[in-house]
Image (cartoon, rainbow, N blue to C red):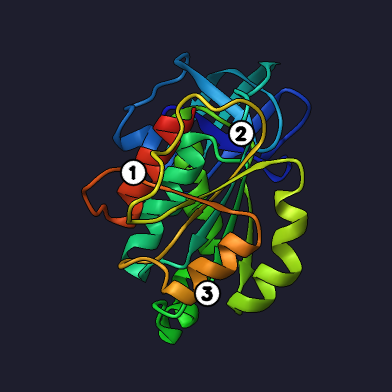
Amino acid sequence: MNLLLFTGADRLDETRIAVHDRRLQHLLQVHRAQPGDTLRVGEINGLMGEAEILQIDDKAAVLAVALDQPPPPKLPLRLILALPRPKMLRRIVRNVAELGVAELHLINSYRVEKSYWQTPALEAATVREYLLQGLEQSRDTRLPAVQYHRRFKPFVEDNLPGLLAGRTALLAHPGEHPPCPRNIEGECLLVIGPEGGFIPYEVEKLRDGGCQPVSLGARILRVENAVTSSLSRLF
């Protein structure tokens, strides 16, 4: 945990916070924190700064905080991702937050099993926890926006036009396509399919909607690696 995140609910007053949950356990077990120690802190969706531990025991840690720095800027990106397998979801969502994606849309696809949409990993509190882990790692405070679209065709026809307005729209898909651009300028929308890629019908719908297919190379990547590879090229 490179940044201890807190919310208004943790505030004791304008300058002090108290933490009791896994953050306390991390301070005790990993940092072996003692009164007088300082660490990096940030208020969720707010500023970052430093905090001094005033007191700490197995019940709570009280810290004096001073916030004076903005979080790092988000990538100018809307990421559209076919819902991954539940076992991969945690890593991908955490990576999305860690890499600075501003907005994530999870969509359906023919190759997305219906059971994926029933996983407890999609519960709001669980997704938020995954995002917070990514923010803690990368020292960021602003939570990415996450939206869910359970029907592919209505998403492409009704939602996609507004999402890609004024943006370069790319579809990372295996095949003979132009290479994914590097160091792109301006706002971008990136679509990545499920394991095995989108089916031809879905590719055509996305192309008709304004997305340009691009290649990440000859190798077929796991979804989580496709996300990281795409973002490293684009930004």
The mark that comes first in sequence, 3 or 2, is 3
At label 2, which amino acid type do we have?
A: Thr
Could you tell me which residue is drawn at 62 percent across and 68 percent down? 148
Q: Secondary structure at mark 1?
A: loop
User: Disc 1 residue type?
Assistant: Leu
Q: Residue at x 43, y 78 (%)?
A: 116
**Total of numbered circles in the picture?**
3
* Residue shown at 35% from the left, 70% from the top: 85
Q: Nearer the viewer, mark 2 or mark 1?
A: 1
Q: Gap between marks 3 and 1, in whole Å?
A: 22 Å
Within 10 angstroms of label 2, few (less than 14), some, or many (20 or more) residues? many
First reached walking from the N terminus: tag 2 or tag 1: 2
Whole-percent x, y for residue 159 in the image: 73, 65
Q: Can residue 1 be seen here?
A: no
The 10 Å Cα crowd at callout 1, few under 14, some 14 to 19, many 20 or more, is: many
Q: Which residue is mark 3?
A: 108
38 or 68: which is nearer to us?
A: 68
Q: Which residue is mark 2?
A: 141
Quadrant containing the N terminus in the rendered view? top left
Q: Residue furthest bottom?
A: 114
Q: Position of residue 21 (x, y in %)?
A: 49, 49
- Seen in the picture, residue 177 relative to 52 is either above or below; the reply is below
Query: In this image, 31 relative to 20: left or right?
Result: left
**9 to 109, vertically: above or below:** above
Element marked by disc 3: loop
Question: Disc 3 or 1, which lies upstream in sequence?
Answer: 3
Q: Nearer the viewer, mark 3 or mark 2?
A: 3
Mark 3 vs 2: CB contact within 8 A: no
Per the image, the residue denoted by label 1 is: 216
Question: Does residue 66 sit above or below 155 in this rendering?
Answer: above
Viewer-nearest of labels 3 and 1? 1
Around disc 3, counting alpha carbons within 10 Å, would you say few (fewer than 14), some (14 to 19), or many (20 or more)? many
